Image (cartoon, rainbow, N blue to C red):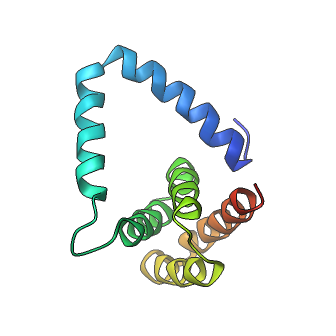
Amino acid sequence: MSDAYKQLTTELSASIGGIRKDIPEVMKGFSAMAGAALEDGALSKKTKEMMALSIGIATHCKGCIGFHVKALVGLGMTREELVEVLGMAVYMGGGPSLMYAAEAMQAFEEFSAA
């Protein structure tokens, strides 16, 4: 799989589509949970996506980084907001999170250029 985030998210989406066919009820439940978790409430959808990105960085999930950065760019995330999220992720996850924070910056630059 490529390290380019647009390609990564496209490839993962295709693979997830196959999983969706194999275990439709599980995926329906996962999608419902994601939709409910991301609804605007006391926290905005954008804030919740920032939290998800930070967790994705801290747990070293490149797919999570790609999908959540893509969503955040669509929600109007600024570079200034991104670097604050990256700071929190590095604070919570230490050195390994710093490496994945660099990955998130790469994804942001890629999706923002589109």
- Residue 106 % position (x, y): 72, 63
Horizontal and vertical percent position of residue 41 = 22, 69
The answer to whether residue 113 is left or right of residue 65 is right
Q: Between residues 58 and 73, which one lies in front from this camera angle?
A: 73
Looking at this rendering, what residue extends furthest in the top direction?
A: 22
Q: Identify which residue is drawn at 50% across, 78% down.
A: 85
The quadrant in which the N terminus is found is: top right
Give me the residue at 53% from left, 50% from top: 67
* Quadrant where the image shows the C terminus: bottom right
Q: Position of residue 98 (x, y in %)?
A: 60, 74
**Residue depicted at 29% across the width and 48% down the height:** 35
Q: At which x and y percent is residue 34?
A: 30, 48
> What residue is shown at x 23% (from left), y 45% (from top)?
33
Vertical placement of 6 versus 90: above or below? above
Q: Is residue 56 above or below residue 81?
A: above
Query: Would residue 109 appear left or right of 98 to someone viewing this image?
Result: right
Total labels: the figure holds 0
Residue 37 falls in image quadrant: bottom left
Please tell me whether residue 6 is drawn above or below residue 84 in the rendered image: above
